Amino acid sequence: MTADAVGGIWFYALDLARGLGAHGVETVLMVLGPTPAADQEAAAAAVPGLRLQTSSLPLDWLAEGPRAVHAAGCAVARMAVECDASLVHLNSPALAAGVQFPVPVVGACHSCVATWWKTMRRGPMPAEFAWRSDLVSHGYAAAAALVAPSAAFAAATAETYRLPTRPLTVHNGRHATATAASGDAAVAFAFTAGRLWDEGKNLMALDRAAARLSLPVLAAGPTEGPNGARVDLLHLKTLGQLSGAAVAAWLRRRPVFVSVARYEPFGLAVLEAAQAGCALVLSDIPSFRELWDGAAEFVPPEDEVAVADAIRRMLCERERRARFGVAARERARRYSVEAMAAGVFGIYRRVLRNAVAPAGREVVA
């Protein structure tokens, strides 16, 4: 399985590997992009049946051109031969473009530049997006199966890439790192977490909403990305990039968790907050509606007045906050690691049953 240590895919990969272990699956996790931090390596070492393999290979969305992505895909295919893998799970399906893998490939549709552009921009994509989108399209075509974390994103992916069938939907799961606190939540503050620099997370709108509030709105995560993107936040109290344990410690205090993302295929941070019993204020986008309808307060993502009013009301009305926190925690039980692993393992089994045995173990680039 491929992964990166930059965002939510890291947590997805570790949790999935842990869950697959219960089905007898051993996972070699090949990390592309920046090297995992010490706490990330420790977390990987704690997963039974997982072997971590770091590399100096570029992420597809940070690569300078198609050749670099192709070379990375070939390296992953060679690793599949070296470790005698039965199947390859690509969390960056662009790696399959133009590469013949020795075993079947399952592609995970977590996000992509084409669906991001369609949500965030108008008009034709720039050249640096177009070639990446083309690689993703070819990678999707090469996969034996595609899986998406929400039906909403599966539909968006199928429409954007004109796929003959939608990717299969397996909702993400998350190993609960912040257990719900007992008693009333006495400390009233709002909290968000993630890649703050990513324009799709819409932190500027939340920053404007925070300017209208007297109670604090805290934001955990990097404000500058590995691609050079950055965001300057004036009214949010930024905490910097925190470890998973540090984020869990904040969530145990049961703040109102806010995400006004415009582009979010799933949202692992929202799930973590819900598992901790946090009340949720979320942007009214298809993926969040699918996952949290009836268990969150929804707001128009670009209306900072509505966002501020929803946060204020949730912070000031303790009973309302507690009620939404309970609803979020109950809903979060649907999105377990066990359910995710069972769904993905079922796809693996079907793909392997339908696979034509390869003539050899060569990797043809």
Image (spheres, grey):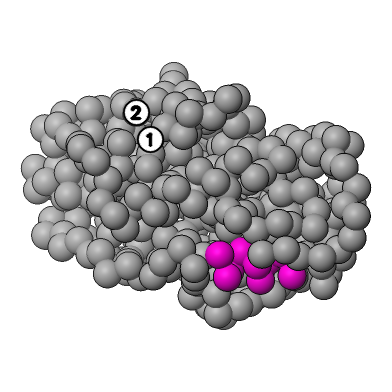
Q: Residue at x 9, y 42 (%)?
A: 212
Answer left or right for 363 relative to 152: right
Secondary structure found at label 2: loop
Within 10 Å of disc 1 (Cα), the crowding (few <14, some 14-19, many 20+) is many
Q: Nearer the viewer, residue 268 or 191?
A: 268
- Image position, residue 114 (x, y; %): 37, 42
Residue type at tag 1: Leu
Residue 73 located within the stretch drawn in magenta? yes
Compared with 340, 78 (above or below) is: below
Within 10 Å of disc 2 (Cα), the crowding (few <14, some 14-19, many 20+) is some
Q: Which residue is mark 1?
A: 280
* Mark seen at residue 308: none
- Image position, residue 28 (x, y; %): 75, 66
Determine the image quadrant of residue 241. Answer: bottom left
Marks 1,2: beta carbons within 8 A = no
CA gap, disc 1 and disc 2: 14 Å
Answer left or right for 216 relative to 113: left
Which numbered mark, 1 or 2, is in the foreground of this view? 2
Residue 77 located within the stretch drawn in magenta? yes
Where's the N terminus, which quadrant? bottom right
Principal SS element in the magenta part?
Answer: helix
Q: Which residues are magenta?
A: 70-78
Determine the image quadrant of residue 80. Answer: bottom right
Q: Earlier in the sequence, mark 1 or mark 2?
A: 1
- Image position, residue 264 (x, y; %): 40, 40
Q: Does residue 116 show up?
A: yes
Compared with 169, 275 (above or below) is: below
Q: Residue at x 55, y 80 (%)?
A: 56
- Image position, residue 141 (x, y; %): 60, 40
Q: Residue at x 58, y 25 (%)?
A: 164
Q: Nearer the viewer, residue 48 or 25?
A: 25
* Mark seen at residue 285: 2
